[in-house]
Amino acid sequence: PATTGPPAGVPHDALVFTGKFANDEHIRVKGAASVLLDTLEYNAHVSGLDALWAGLPLVTLSGSNMARRCGASFLLALGIPETLARTP
């Protein structure tokens, strides 16, 4: 995937982009990460669920419409609101 570089303060070698995997391998690869940083424009949806299933913390911010609130809904439904950001 194309990228303009890592977000401010994130070392370039901390980001890993991969191709597609079979589902069982996909979950294992997600489990090797440290955290899933969700996007605001369009939350993680299935990727967020996969990350949580793999035991990966999901950091997200609830937005103004359904597509921007999925990550928050997952965290609240699971009773783990600690990684739900309240402000950008």
Image (tube, grey):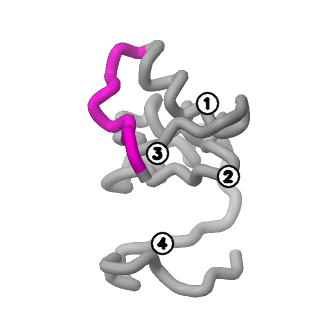
- Relative to the observer, which residue lies in front, 53 or 80? 80
Residue 82, magenta (yes or no): yes
Task: Identify which amino acid the numbered label 2 is placed on.
Answer: Glu
What residue is drawn where x is 63% and y is 81%? 3
Does the CB distance between marks 4 and 3 fall below 8 Å? Answer: no
Residue 80, magenta (yes or no): yes
Which of the two labelled residues, at mark 4 and mark 3, occupies the earlier sequence position?
A: 4
Which of the two labelled residues, at mark 3 and mark 2, occupies the earlier sequence position?
A: 3
Task: Please state the extent of the stretch shown in magenta in the rendering.
Answer: 78-87
- Disc 3 versus disc 2: nearer the observer: 2
Does the CB distance between marks 3 and 2 fall below 8 Å? Answer: no
Please state if 80 lies on the left or on the right of 73 as rendered. Answer: left
Q: Residues within 10 Å of mark 1 (few under 14, many from 20)?
A: many
Secondary structure at badge 4 equals: loop
Q: CA gap, disc 2 to disc 1?
A: 11 Å
Task: Identify which amino acid the numbered label 4 is placed on.
Answer: Val
Q: CA gap, disc 4 to disc 1?
A: 24 Å
What residue is drawn where x is 43% and y is 18%? 76
Report the residue marked by disc 2. 41
Task: Identify which amino acid the numbered label 3 is placed on.
Answer: Arg
Which of the two labelled residues, at mark 2 and mark 4, occupies the earlier sequence position?
A: 4
Q: CA gap, disc 3 to disc 2?
A: 26 Å
- Disc 1 versus disc 3: nearer the observer: 1
What residue is drawn where x is 34% and y is 76%? 10
Report the residue marked by disc 3. 28
The image quadrant of residue 8 is bottom left
Please state if 57 lies on the left or on the right of 27 as rendered. Answer: left
Across and down, in percent, residue 58 comes to 41, 41
What residue is drawn where x is 47% and y is 49%? 30
Q: CA gap, disc 4 to disc 3?
A: 14 Å
Report the residue marked by disc 4. 16
Q: Residues within 10 Å of mark 2 (few under 14, many from 20)?
A: some
